[in-house]
Amino acid sequence: HVSTKPPPEPSPLRKAKFFQANMRILVTGGAGFIGSHLVDKLMQNEKNEVIVVDNYFTGSKDNLKQWIGHPRFELIRHDVTEPLLIEVDQIYHLACPASPIFYKYNPVKTIKTNVIGTLNMLGLAKRTGARILLTSTSEVYGDPLMHPQDETYWGNVNPIGVRSCYDEGKRVAETLMFDYHRQHGIEIRIARIFNTYGPRMNIDDGRVVSNFIAQAIRDEPLTVQLPGTQTRSFCYVSDMVDGLMRLMDGDNTGPINIGNPGEFTMLELAENVKELINPEVKIITVENTPDDPRQRKPDITKAKELLGWEPKVKLRDGLPLMEEDFRGRLGISRKK
Ligand code: NAD
Ligand code: UDP
Ligand code: UDP
């Protein structure tokens, strides 16, 4: 017998929280790349108190140094696979390594983070009445057979591959979100994030934009993985943060794609980096890794219609901003 009863109404406590002026906002994974930019933006609003929870696996305190000691800011070293008992009104749940080399490093831990970590944050949302946003990923579409990908597409994912800890982990995380929503009336938001780039990316995390920029600055050849015709669509981090906040503060659960529909082959990306950053640098081809999706481009119709959002920063404008940050961290200035 399948129950058809509608999800429970939000409790008066939860409704009251929504209208309350001061917001206590938890950002899990807030010491990471996207999380720290989100924290910067949230802290600009004087009505927000921001709590970051992070285990520093791929993130760093350095990304938050501007806020440490601020009266509206708190940083907690904590692993989301362990229960967390605090009082909050909103949860941005980002904690999870995002780069293939890091999420493949300890795949079992990656699954625990996605499954147990998300379960714990949903338990916290249930106890406190907080609204929770999950940063899911375009990887839930796997190696997509539909192009571009819209949110109705169920994906083409290998359940036993080396990327599965991440892809399937995020798919279960999405399932948990919807089950808590249907079963317990939790207010959920799901963003499916497409490749994002910008300052504070890990320099050596193996992702393509960070690799190419670091290589160009270091005068090393740009390593295009074969065949080089595979595509990605890159969103600048300030656009991403804007999209995530609109989703959290709006009325739609999602899932909603957030990404930049400008699509590039990896060879085109390398040529852009070469032209903008180091015209002398060589471009070489190298072996690829298993299960690499051949194409990826978001259909952002839903984000445009429901959130009034679309990305503003073009790749050719975003790359130089990232170059500046990388030069600062690598201590290599531009040749005259
Ligand atoms: P990141 O690696 O810079 O940030 C992740 C943060 O989570 C790090 O600070 C890390 O230390 C922390 N973390 C990892 N496991 C944890 C755990 N068990 N407990 C507590 N903290 C933990 O990655 P990012 O690029 O900022 O990604 C943030 C979120 O966005 C992730 O959920 C990722 O899956 C999602 N996402 C990112 C991209 C992208 O292109 N960057 C694309 C799709 C989805
Ligand atoms: N949880 C948490 N913080 C809370 C409430 C719950 O970390 O404030 C964890 C709790 O330890 C559990 C998970 O979230 O493992 C799911 O909680 P829920 O109450 O939904 O399930 P139950 O505890 O009944 O299994
Ligand atoms: N890639 C590349 N050179 C590199 C690193 C990655 O050509 O030095 C390619 C990789 O084969 C993939 C694309 O860039 O097709 C994006 O890879 P990344 O790891 O950045 O992200 P994801 O695969 O998660 O989209």
Image (cartoon, rainbow, N blue to C red):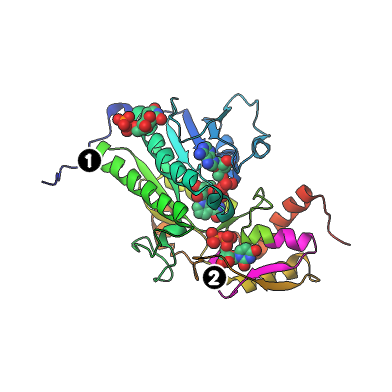
Q: What's the amino acid at mark 2?
A: Thr
Q: Is residue 128 a member of the stretch shown in magenta? A: no
The residue under label 1 is which amino acid type?
A: Pro
The CA span between labels 2 and 1 is 40 Å
Depth check: give the residue in front, 176 or 89: 176
For marks 2 and 1 on the same chain, the one whose residue lies earlier in the sequence: 1
Left or right: 87 with respect to 266? left
Residue holding disc 1: 7
In the displayed orientation, state which residue is furthest to the left: 1
According to the picture, the residue beneath numbered tag 2 turns out to be 231
- Split into quadrants, the picture shows ligand 3 in the one at bottom right
Stretch of the chain drawn in magenta: 212-234
Quadrant where the C terminus sits is bottom right
Q: Is 172 on the left-hand or right-hand side of 100?
A: left
Q: Quadrant of residue 50?
A: top right
Q: Is residue 270 above or below residue 213?
A: below
Residue drawn at x 24%, y 39% is: 183
Counting from the top left corner in percent of width and height, residue 116 is at 41, 39
Q: Secondary structure at mark 1?
A: loop
Asked whether 142 or 255 is in front, the reply is 142
Mark 1, other Cα within 10 Å: few <14 / some 14–19 / many ≥20: few
- Image x and y of residue 32, in percent: 59, 43
Give me the residue at 47% from left, 30% from top.
23
Rendered location of residue 247, percent (x, y) = 43, 47
Which label was assigned to residue 251? none
43 up-or-down from 168: above or below: above
Looking at the rendering, which quadrant does residue 132 occupy? top left
